[in-house]
Amino acid sequence: MQQAIPYSKGAAWVRRSNDGRRPPVEPAAMAARCVASSGDIRRVVEENPVVVVGRRGCCMVHVVRRLLLGQGVNPTVCEVGEDADEAALIGELHPEMAAEGGDGGAHLRGQGMVLPAVFIGGRLVGGLDRLMAVHISGELVPILKQAGALWL
Amino acid sequence: MSSTSAHFATSRRMAVYQPNHQISMWGNSFKADISQNTGASTIVEADTKLDNRLEDIPRESLGPSKRYDQEANKPADKVVRRLAQNREAARKSRLRKKAYVQQLESSRIKLAQLEQELERARQQGVYIGGHLGDATLGLPGTVNSGVAAFEMEYGHWVEEQNRQTRELRAALQAHVSDIELHMLVESGMSHYDDLFRIKAIAAKSDVFYLMSGMWKTAVERFFLWIGGFRPSELLKVLTSQLDPLTEQQLVAVHNLQLSSQQAEYALSQGMDRLQQTIVETLASDLLGASGAANCMGQMANAMGELEALVSFVNQADHLRQQALQQMYKILTTRQAARALLALGDYFQRLRALSSLWAARPREPA
């Protein structure tokens, strides 16, 4: 089974003790948005540390963005058309994965390649489900730091 | 008495008619019970008696005195008989009425009791025979089978949770081994998994029902957040019960609470955004005459947007599950057992509070 990003299990990490409940960070500039075709998405993912790919008008994209903003990162949001084909996107972004078996889309959807999808450091983290799990287990911040999206 | 016509050529006919007339009278008062038999037998009697009388009479017109005799005898017998029958009928009628009234009274009392029970059950959130998704109907309309199935399963789930809570308390008081505690903790955790599983099925069936919280008690509904409990609140309840914790554990628990709050905030923001989107869709061009096609297009868009609610409920449940599992990772077996006991107790208290509130004496209006 292919893991997008390897992670350790159950390692506790320590935040700075004077962290109260962090207020939501509103960046001065709007989060960079792009309306892209599948070809462009691959380039965007490679060039930006944190990328959220989602359908236009999807409220879950907003949730993902809020969660990441709350951690202090400014994600690049890539909007695809409402009728964009997920399978085509997967084929574009992970040709090696799509090559596995005929129903590569479903196989990946089982792994979390649903929209909205989160890419950190050019690699697929997964959908909102996965992002939540990683966030609750405390591994999100180390991943962000590793990708250079966060500085202490 | 029918006419006192003296034509004996018709007397036999009169004899025949009278019994019929009497039958219909009796039929009305007795209403298809055994008295009709009495009537019939009386008719037979009357017939034979009349026949006997008539046999004595030659078939020419008689003198008035003889005719008068006959008619004087006939009324006496018949009247006496009819009076007796009337008394009997009236008595039976009174008895029947008494029985009927008694039945009515007891039915009324039973109905009042049932209404009370229903009101109480409603207040406790067990909505029987209908669901609030269809708010346009004043009455319980079509019963959604998915909702009915969920209510039944949730009822079982609560019973099982109460049982597990009792078992945990007994085990902790009896100081059983860690291995036994571990098994109880495992069942407790998988029991919560069961809840999220049945909720996911119900969300597909009727997400608004789930979001309304009508399947929970009133006080639980007060604390409702996206169709269930708020994880960070639950964590607060737990941490106060779990001393002593190591330094590392304290930090981990604190971080978990923070992460949960942040995730809850993100989801709440998403819900606000969804509300906004639907408002914009429905409110576009309210006064314009863009035609039915446009309106239907709007509705179709709004329908698509509403679908997102199912995702929100699923994501919220996923967050609840993740928070519980992370807590489980942080704690030792014994601490986890105490945490599950505390949770079970807390939910029981919320439900008990709902019942007390529903049953509280109220000032007369």
Image: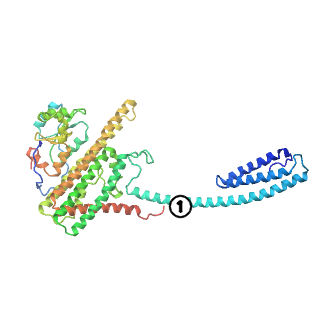
Total marks placed: 1
Q: Is residue B296 above or below residue B126?
A: above
Percent of width and height locating residue A80: 21, 34
Chain letter of the residue carrying label 1: B
Instruction: Identify the residue at horizontal 26%, vertical 47% (top origin).
Output: B314
Q: Is residue B262 above or below residue A124?
A: below
Q: Is residue B166 left or right of residue B362?
A: left
Say which of B109 and B248 sits in front.
B109
Residue A150 appears anywhere in the view: no
Percent of width and height locating residue A67: 19, 47
Q: Is residue A48 left or right of residue B71?
A: left
Q: Quadrant of residue A33?
A: top left
Instruction: Identify the residue at horizontal 38%, vertical 55% (top origin).
Output: B126
Colour mapping: rainbow
Question: Disc 1 designates what residue?
Answer: B106
Say which of B259 and B11 sits in front.
B11
Instruction: Identify the residue at horizontal 46%, vertical 64% (top origin).
Output: B363
Percent of width and height locating residue B109: 51, 61
Q: Is residue B80 left or right of residue B298?
A: right
Residue B319 appears anywhere in the view: yes
Q: The disc labelled 1 sits on which kind of residue?
A: Ser
Say which of B354 and B110 sits in front.
B110
Q: Residues within 10 Å of mark 1 (few under 14, many from 20)?
A: few
Percent of width and height locating residue B163: 29, 62
Instruction: Identify the residue at horizontal 47%, vertical 60% (top origin).
Output: B113
* Element assignment for label 1: helix
